[in-house]
Image (cartoon, helix red, strand yellow):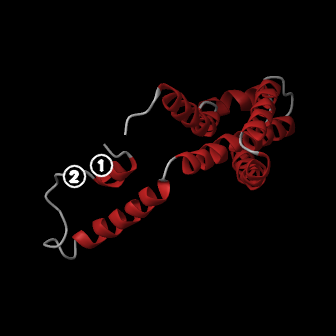
């Protein structure tokens, strides 16, 4: 299966939307000490911002999924990205830990739309039901290969990931 230029652009955008949340966490973790000093608070309170972020991510998925099903993928995603952008700018101007918590919650809440909508779009555009079924089958195969090596391919020719992902990208 060869992707057209438009499909490739869509795949890249979906991947970037999915990576948005991970980047939002990983880019600020090393700055916990500096944030603590800047806001003149305990590092434990800064660590709470990670829990608040993950809570916002969970709550956001509950909203953005049904909204994108009801109103389509485009407008909920545009609104969410706008909220994410505003929240990201506001994080730069916080003067208290509570403001940081609020901004980080809004960042995660709105950023979760990218993950939810990207996954929904992948399922909608591509047949991932068969891919998911194959992944589950491979998990059982990997587990059972130890018990019955004669029945399952244990020669090492297929890597674990290759076995999982091969049906997702047919040739």
Q: Nearer the viewer, residue 1 or 63?
A: 1
Find residue 160 and report its image quarter.
Answer: bottom left
Secondary structure under the numbered disc 2 in the rendered image: loop
Give the residue at x 38% y 34%: 2
Vertical position of residue 132 compared to residue 159: above or below: below
Q: Identify residue for label 1.
A: 162
Q: Nearer the viewer, residue 104 or 9?
A: 9
Q: Pinpoint residue 97: horizontal percent, then vertical percent.
A: 82, 37
Q: Nearer the viewer, residue 128 or 83?
A: 128
Q: Nearer the viewer, residue 118 or 93?
A: 118
Q: Identify residue for label 2.
A: 158
Give the residue at x 39% y 60%: 135
Q: Residues within 10 Å of mark 2 (few under 14, many from 20)?
A: few
Secondary structure under the numbered disc 1 in the rendered image: helix
Marks counted in the figure total: 2
Q: Pinpoint residue 33: horizontal percent, then vertical percent.
A: 66, 31
Q: Left or right: where does residue 155 sit relative to residue 86?
A: left
Q: Left or right: where does residue 59 sit relative to residue 148?
A: right
Find residue 139 and report its image quarter.
Answer: bottom left
Q: In the rendered image, is residue 102 in sight?
A: yes
Q: Left or right: where does residue 2 sit relative to residue 123?
A: left
Give the residue at x 79% y 28%: 91
> Considering the image in quadrants, where does the N terminus appear?
top left
Q: Left or right: where does residue 99 sit relative to residue 19?
A: right
Find residue 103 and report its image quarter.
Answer: top right
Vertical position of residue 11 compared to residue 58: above or below: above
Q: Are marks 2 and 1 in contact (CB under 8 Å)?
A: yes
Give the residue at x 64% y 34%: 24
Q: In the rendered image, is residue 43 in sight?
A: no
């Amino acid at each position: 299966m060869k992707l057209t230029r438009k499909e490739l652009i869509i795949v890249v955008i979906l991947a970037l939307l999915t990576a948005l949340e991970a980047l939002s966490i990983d880019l600020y973790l090393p700055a916990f000490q500096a944030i603590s000093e800047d806001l003149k608070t305990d590092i434990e309170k800064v660590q709470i911002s990670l829990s608040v972020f993950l809570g916002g991510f969970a709550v956001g998925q509950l909203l953005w999924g049904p909204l994108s099903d009801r109103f389509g993928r485009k407008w909920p995603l545009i609104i969410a990205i706008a909220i994410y952008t505003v929240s990201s700018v506001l994080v730069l101007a916080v003067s208290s830990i509570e403001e940081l918590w609020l901004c980080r919650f809004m960042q995660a809440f709105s950023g979760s739309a990218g993950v939810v909508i990207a996954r929904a779009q992948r399922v909608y555009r591509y047949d991932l039901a068969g891919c998911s079924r194959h992944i589950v089958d491979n998990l059982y195969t990997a587990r059972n290969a130890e018990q019955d090596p004669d029945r399952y391919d244990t020669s090492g020719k297929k890597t674990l990931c290759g076995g999982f992902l091969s049906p997702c990208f047919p040739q």
